[in-house]
Each structure stands twice: as C-alpha cells, then as structure tokens.
Amino acid sequence: MIHPALESYVRAVRESPPVHPSSLSADERRAAYRTVALAHRGDVSTVASVRDLDLALDGRTLRARLYVPPEDEGKALVVYFHGGGFVVGDLDTHDALCRRLSADTGMRFLAVNYRLAPENPFPSGIDDAVDTLRYVAAHLAEFDSADAQLMVMGDSAGATLITVACALTKDEGLAIAAQVIIYPTLGPELYTDSARKFGVGHVLDVEHLRYDYELYLGPWRDHTDPRVSPLMFEDLTGAPPAIVVVAQCDPLRDEGVAYAGLLEHFGVPVELLEAEGMIHGFLRLPTNVPETLIIIDDLAVHMHRYVEHASS
C-alpha cells in the first residue's frame, strides 16, 4: 500500500503521466528532470562547505562535488553516483540529497558526474565508476583524512554502476568499507513480480526504463553480461559489505532483494532495509514525505556500523 503522504503525488502522476521518453531529446529530458528535482528538493541541509572539482581519470576528466558536513567526523568518505536511468541526472539534481546525507552521517560525500547515454553508451558509465573508485582509493588524502574509511553509494542507475564496480574491483585491495545500494536497477529484463505489480502508475514506468536501457546499452546485446545484469555474477566472494535499500511499492524492489540474497550466498555481510509504502526515488521527496528524513537517519546509523567495524 502506498504511503498516505505519497497518495496525492502518485495520483497526480497517474492523471498526467509523462510522455514516452522517445518523444524528447536527451537534453530536453535532462532539463525536465532537473526542473522536477529542484521543485521537490525541500529544505536544503546546511553543510560546512561544498566544492566543485575535477577527477583526472585515464583519458578523461569527470566533474565532481565534495560535501563537508557541519560536524565532520573525518571517519569516512562516501563516493556517490546519482540515479536517472543512465540518461539523465547530474550533480545538481541530487545536490539536496547529498547535502542531507552528508549532514546526517557526519561523513564527507563526493558526488560524481559520470558520463551519460546515449552520447556515452555502455560500458562508459561502468568504466567511470571503476576508475573513480581506483582513483579515490589511491588519492584519499585529497578528499578526506588519509585514514578515513572509503564507502561507495548509488541510487537506481547509480546503484547499478557501484554494484558492478565493487564486484569488478573486489580483489584489488581498495579497502571499501561498504557499498550502499539504493533501489537498484539490475538489468533490462524487468520481469519480476514487483515489476508487474508496480511497473505502471507508480512513478517509475518499466517501459520507460526499458527504453533507457536501449539508449544505455546501444549496440551491446548480451543481457547476461554481469556488467549489464549484476544478478548474473558467478562469484561475489570478497565484495564489500553491503546495505541494500528497497522501496515496497517500487517495480525494482524484487531485484534489490535478490541481489542482497546473492551477496549473502557468497558470504558478503548484507543489511536489507525496506521502506514500507515508499516508491522509487522516495529519498528525493522530503517535501512529500517527511518520514524520508527518518529513513535517512536510520540509514546513517547502519552506515556508521560499517565504518566503526572497519576502523576496529
């Protein structure tokens, strides 16, 4: 059942459903997504400082934004990858969320502006995530104290990128204390029970997401590639501990639950958190659901457990 605070929001979306993404250019969609994101950002949390910077990766430079919380504990740096179906989203669309998370956790956040499709199709985003983790792990003192723990977080499409990056680098000694996976999309098939139940009329439309996967994958056709569908990884032994956040009324719920189970199967410590009555993207809707802030508080507690464990 949809959370009562979300009923009017969901009803408005059903009454005026968004046009199919194929009818708009990528730039038009990004502008529209940015407008909606800014409209729903709510009160912006105060942080000590925000600084835009560049990450000099091999053959390219990515924009990034470093958030320092008002009470900087110096215990962890969280590298963050935003959602947006691999096609939309940027540092500004998720700015308010990163500020809230940084202020609530007392951790520094480094948000990354990875390359988007269709201009940069698969595996560009994966390469950006992998190379960013390698770069930050090797240059941690540029962003936080040299003895801070490294964590990685992503929502939706960004969660896909970090799950793959953590799996691909699990044997490289990057010392990632935890991966925080928020309502991930884990492949283009979308045939789970939750996709059938919530795939239409619950804000995230699975047909729209399938179209975004077409843009993201471009000429790549192998959906069994675990970089495309992380549930296909044959061995996740040694992957970083995980916190998996799912929303009860999200078409992607079952995928997140399944990935938590897959990690557990390979002996990876996992905490699965389900937000009752919530929809996909709920963490960016504090103006609609004040309880979102309570969920962020709870997530911060779970994140701290991994930091303290890694430090002990």
Image: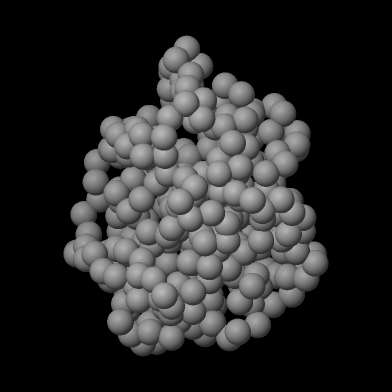
Q: Is residue 13 visible?
A: yes
Residue at the location (61% across, 77% down)? 169
| Position of residue 87 in the picture relative to residue 141 (left or right) | right
| Relative to 246, 194 lies left or right | right
Name the residue nearer the viewer: 72 or 207: 207
From what the image shows, is residue 273 above or below residue 304? above
Describe residue 237's horizontal placement relative to residue 253 as left or right: right
**Residue 11 horizontal/vertical position (percent):** 48, 16
Q: Is residue 53 left or right of residue 310?
A: left
70 in relation to 206, above or below? below
Q: Quadrant of the N terminus?
A: top right
Closer to us: 155 or 260: 155
Examine the image and state in which quarter residue 81 appears. bottom left
Q: Residue at x 60, y 44 (%)?
A: 213
Q: Give the residue at the far front of this rendering.
A: 219
Of 242 and 134, which appears nearest the observer?
A: 134
| Above or below 42: residue 108 | below
Asked whether the viewer can see residue 155, the reply is no
Who's the residue at 73% across and 59% down the image?
225
Give the answer, above or below, for where 57 lies relative to 161: below
Residue 59, position in %: x, y? 41, 75
Residue drawn 42% across the image and 44% down it: 88
Residue 21 at x, y = what percent? 49, 30
Front in this rendered view, residue 111 or 25:
25
